[in-house]
Amino acid sequence: MNKHSVHPNTIRGILCVSGVSLFFLVPAASRSFILGTVCALVLFSLSPGGLNTLIKCAVATSLAAVFLISGDRILTMCVPILFFLILPDFKILSEKRALFGDFKVKYDELLKKLLEFEKKNNEMAQHIEKLKSEIEKYEKLYELSKDIESISDGRELANKSLDAFSLKLGIEKLAFFRVMASGMELFSSKNLRADEIDDWKRMLGNIKNIPGGNRYEFPLVAGKKKLGAILVAGALDEKQINKAVVISSQVALGYEKTVLYEQVRELSRIDGLTGLFLRKYFMSRLEEEITRARRYDYEIAFLMCDLDDFKKYNDTYGHPMGDNVLAQAAKAIRDTINPSDFAGRYGGEEFCIYMPMAARIQTREKAEKIREEVKRDTSVSISIGIAYFPTDGSTAHDLIKASDATLYKAKKNGKNIVGEYA
């Protein structure tokens, strides 16, 4: 408010004092006019709205009643003026009520829109959370695909694949089957009992991936070539089934690489002429077997084999014939030993074999059978020296040394002989 302006209450006070003064100063006949005028001016001086309107209505009604009861003609004439003066207040009240009504409508509309916005905001938040979850899942799938690409060992890949299926799908019981020449073979599994393997094999190719089922089969296919399948036990929904299909496609690509890698690696380990393992790889496997034998306390039979007078035969009949003899001797060895035994080409005409947990009598029988078959199928004979871990040697070097000494004695005693280290 301007500091030079006069407060409304001051004006009202001046009007009241002036009215009272005039009321007593003027003649009695004019006092009623003065009273009505002062009251009207006081009412007029009050600004419309709020508490003032209530006061003005109450005062105007009271004065109107008093004026009418007084019977004074002048005061009675002031009654319409009193109500005329408070008409603006009723107008303002009406306008405010209308404004309040508009405000209420707009408030309700705004509240409705706010609730709709809140609902959409919640839906958007849920959608964002789902997207985040999907992004995290695909990031993990991408990490899985990178991990799979970096794995060169088939069994390690199979184990990691089952771990991935278990983690992503919440499945505890599953198996990895691979395609072999003899058919589908169990390669790796989680929580699968030995007595369940045959039943799971029979299910292969007969399972339909229906949401809410209890068995699912996810083929591992690279291009048009089927490499195997992953079987899982448990109920999956459609989203989980689709996720499993994506994972299995990644696994198939990775497994195809490991198969090719292992084929190449196997070729690099095998002697092309005899089909037996090369010396370096054979020795590494022998070292591993000796380590296991120490831990679990079992015996290993080691055989060193050498074709008798092979150099003379080779020089006489030529290298092609000599190569044929080497191949026949290697075949005799492969046909005689067990799947758990391991044979390699140690040198030119030398072969070596180790037999884990083999009884000495059976070892001797196998050695004699190899000697007989080589003599029968080729024009040369073979001498064999046998040594045992740990009695004849506690290291690979010691076993070779002991069996070589036994082989030397066999050669010295007439060749075509099987000898044991003593």
Image: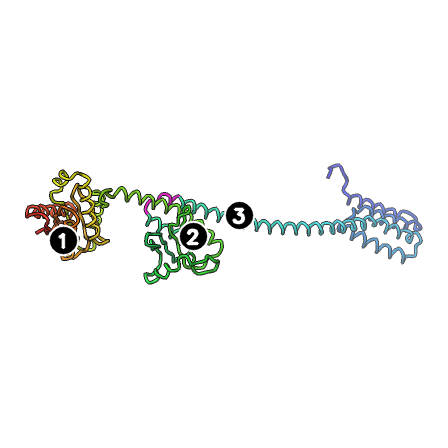
Looking at the image, is mark 1 or mark 2 earlier in the sequence?
2
- The kind of residue on which mark 2 rests is Lys
Magenta stretch in the rendered image: 146-153
196, above or below 405, in the image? below
Secondary structure type for disc 3: helix
Foreground of the two, 410 or 85: 410
CA gap between label 1 and label 2 equals 56 Å
CA gap between label 2 and label 3 equals 20 Å
Quadrant of the frame with the N terminus: top right
User: Which dot, 2 or 3, sits closer to the camera?
Assistant: 2
Looking at the image, is mark 2 or mark 3 earlier in the sequence?
3
Q: Return the mark for residue 128.
A: 3
Secondary structure type for disc 2: helix
Secondary structure type for disc 1: helix
On the image, the x and y values in percent for residue 300 come to 17, 53
- The kind of residue on which mark 1 rests is Glu
| Predominant SS along the magenta part | helix
Within 10 Å of disc 3 (Cα), the crowding (few <14, some 14-19, many 20+) is few
Residue topped by disc 2 = 168
- The kind of residue on which mark 3 rests is Ile
On the image, the x and y values in percent for residue 259 come to 34, 46
Q: Is residue 87 left or right of residue 297?
A: right
